[in-house]
Image (cartoon, helix red, strand yellow):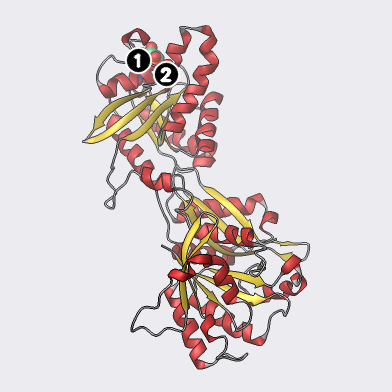
Amino acid sequence: NASVAIVGRPNVGKSTLFNRLVGRKLALVDDQPGVTRDRREGEATLGHLAFRVFDTAGLEEAADDSLTGRMRQQTETAIADSDIIMFVIDARVGVTPSDRQFAELVRRSGKPVILVANKAEGRVGLDGAYDAFSLGLGDPVPLSAEHGEGTSDLLEALMPFFPDADDEEEEEEAGLDEEGNLRRPLRIAISGRPNAGKSTLINQMIGEERLLTGPEAGITRDSISLDWEWRGHAIKLYDTAGMRKRARIDDKLEKLSVADGLRAIRFAEVVVVLLDATIPFEKQDLTIVDLIEKEGRAVVIGLNKWDLVSDQHGLLKELREEASRLLSQVKGVSVIPVSGLTGRGIDPLMESIFDAYRIWNERVSTSRLNRWLVDMVEGHPPPAVSGRRIKIRYITQVKSRPPHFALFGNQLSELPRSYTRYLVNGLRETFALKGTPIRLSLRSGD
Ligand code: GDP
């Protein structure tokens, strides 16, 4: 469970904020015997988030406006013990020298900080908040701990640091154990234009004429997947062709088949886009890749009917180049020759599918990300907008499947697309996120 320290000079309202977060549960807080700590701890809830919170408010009376040794020590301990820091200032007073001393402690810790401008009832004191920017801790979140105003902004600011809170389902679903082995069947959809050879390939994989037997054989609309096993791994194959063929039986169902194809993609974790290597990269192929990218699935390109290709070496080189040019949204995607007819290439295709799956599940640590971000911003600073520089200050990965990052700073809505592309490409290269969609959310304080 994440822990949050409430830090700041005396009288900015740390206790009030603590009480607001912990509420009635405060009664349950007990001091651990034998441990003398000048702080209170409690279980906080804010929206759907639950976390441990502590403050140094016990020192309020002891300390005056300067940072005494005891207070400094307690604050440092609180910072060290926490994952996230809420640094509180008084919005009506503005930034005092004492605030700056505390800010220095906080900044030195390198931990994620949420700057809270408290006592901002009715948003008063927001003019003063402007000078809070000079603390270098990002945009202040205006709050009235006493009146409970601004808690949704606070929640918003905290959310990115709780990657698991909104994806319990995802955690449950995450198919990899600690060693990176699959815990349950890998769900693969085989997609592609009609006649790319999807059915043939799947038949070859599962080794029986199961698909072509049609609806009479009892493939019901609900059982849209086929169970298979490859090198001891359980696989569920979602076949988009089988559904299309079934749909043909009834004209009315043509539209439904598109929806079913989409459903297969949504069910799947990795989607193979099967191209006919003799007529590759048709418009429809590109549309399918776009769709998969929008759905956020891992992608592998299969070049089918490779048995018909004479200059295999030349064509492969050419098509890989073409893929990197045409499919920039999943840059680095694997392009694997295969023949559904002979079965050649199925093993390399499967290996690429597993690689793509691992990348899709990747989690990059916040410290690595932020070291990378410093280099990126130094190498190529974002432009100034109407005299004010866009400030990028922090990045964290909020989700995986596919990798999803949140970028924090000021004026981020003004970031040119070319700049976000620069960042996404950088993420892709540095953290080897090949062939997966990447999401980047901008969380700006203004
Ligand atoms: P689907 O519509 O994508 O399911 O495509 P099918 O599996 O029905 O295949 C369409 C046509 O391509 C059929 O005539 C297959 O025999 C042929 N075909 C499929 N895979 C291959 C392959 O790897 N090599 C060759 N030479 N022909 C193939």
Element type where label 1 sits in the image: loop
**Residue 423 left/right relative to 362:** right
In percent of width and height, residue 401 lies at 44, 45
Residue 140 marker: none
2 or 1: tag closer to the N-terminus? 1
Nearest the eye: 252 or 289: 252
Circle 2 residues within 10 Å: few <14, some 14–19, many ≥20: many
Location of residue 127 with respect to 328 vertically, above or below = below
Question: What residue type is disc 1 on?
Answer: Ile
Circle 1 residues within 10 Å: few <14, some 14–19, many ≥20: some
Residue at 44% over, 53% down: 164
Residue at which label 1 appears:
219
Location of residue 363 with respect to 381 vertically, above or below = above
Residue at 50% over, 92% down: 69
In percent of width and height, residue 341 lies at 31, 18
Nearest the eye: 144 or 172: 144
In percent of width and height, residue 365 lies at 42, 61
**Pointers 2 and 1 in contact (CB under 8 A)?**
no
Question: What residue type is disc 2 on?
Answer: Ala
Identify the image quadrant of residue 238. Answer: top left
Residue at 60% over, 91% down: 64
Residue at which label 2 appears:
241
Identify the image quadrant of residue 103. Answer: bottom right
Element type where label 2 sits in the image: helix
**Residue 129 left/right relative to 211:** right
Ligand 1 within 8 Å of the CB at mark 2: yes
Nearest the eye: 121 or 4: 121
Location of residue 329 with respect to 204 vertically, above or below = below
Q: Quadrant of ligand 1?
A: top left
In percent of width and height, residue 34 lies at 33, 84
